[in-house]
Image (spheres, helix red, strand yellow):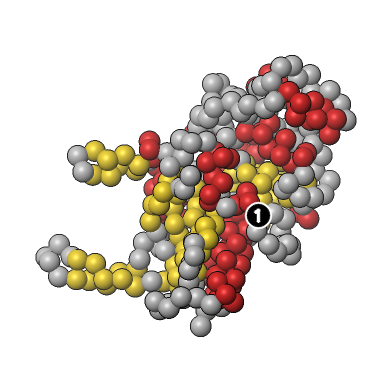
Amino acid sequence: MLISEQFHLVKRCAVVCAVLLASFGCSSTTERNSSTAREGRDVFGRSTQMEGATWNDANADAIRVPTALGPNAWTIVLTAIEGDQQDRANHLLEQVQSVGRLPDAFLMERNGRQIIAVGSYQSPTEQVATIELERVRSIEVEGAYPFARAFLAPPSGDLSRGTIPEYDLRNAKAQYGNDVRYTLQIAVFAREDTEKPSSEEQALFRRSAEDATRALRQGGELAFYYHGPNRSMVTIGVFTEEDHEIDGGIAIESARLQAARNRHPKNLLNGRTIIEKVRSSNGGFVERDQRSSLVSIPG
């Protein structure tokens, strides 16, 4: 009853969460212990000139990672631009390489979009990848951290199966800080009745949600999955209370959150639109597509 329709979700995938470079949004400097910093020197085969326990902006230009593995590797996604905006993509790449202090950044095409990325790694868990991701996020430009929401994305080809903790919504606060409160739910994989799923169905729901999350990340979205006891959800983005404020009973949302809603206006069930009835202004009921919804990040 369910099945490969989850791949419809990939087609609905649009641009990455609010363009980091346009806002140069702020984030706090990341802390590392000194032993891990010393390991970083060993990994890269040259001195990073680190002193003390803080991975800070003064060290941000000390190391570089080659990109020889190309499209068959994991890479750090900085931002994404629609494929028909090549001039804009080239201009942003120049900014990243010069102002953004990442001269090794490059453009690649994935799912019809131009991705600005840096680095190439065999696995998202290898030490060089985690250290370099932290370095990129910590780069400071004019008092702000333009790459604070950079993330590791899988290669474009066949993807390995199994869970990826970095994509689990339960780990989002550990990665992006306790200030992140919300994420936008855009898809659910579950039975379409009220029956409890079998173990085979539950495994299918979880696999479908993880596959959709991987595909969204390939397309430049900061996507997550969340496995509940009976269903699995897919969300995009991390948002703080500043992105969603209540003023006089009215919700005021940031441009970044509104942009995410515009890219993913619907909450899909097994890759299909959910039709729901809602009360109209005259007291009756009307049918509409169920909208994507803001949900709390656990933890």
Type of the residue with mark 1:
Ile
Residue 104 in percent (x, y) is at 75, 36
Residue 287 in percent (x, y) is at 27, 72
Which residue is painted at 21% across and 43% down in the image?
A: 249
Which residue is painted at 31% across and 39% down in the image?
A: 245
Which residue position is annotated with label 1? 164
User: Which quarter of the picture shows residue 252?
Assistant: top left
Task: Name the element at disc 1.
Answer: loop
Check the image and report above or below for 293 versus 176.
below
The residue lying furthest to the bottom in this view is: 1
Please state if 202 lies on the left or on the right of 37 as rendered: left
Check the image and report above or below for 243 versus 262.
above
Residue 82 in percent (x, y) is at 56, 52
Which residue is painted at 42% across and 63% down in the image?
A: 267
Please state if 49 lies on the left or on the right of 297 as rendered: right
- Residue 12 seen anywhere in this rendered image of the structure: no
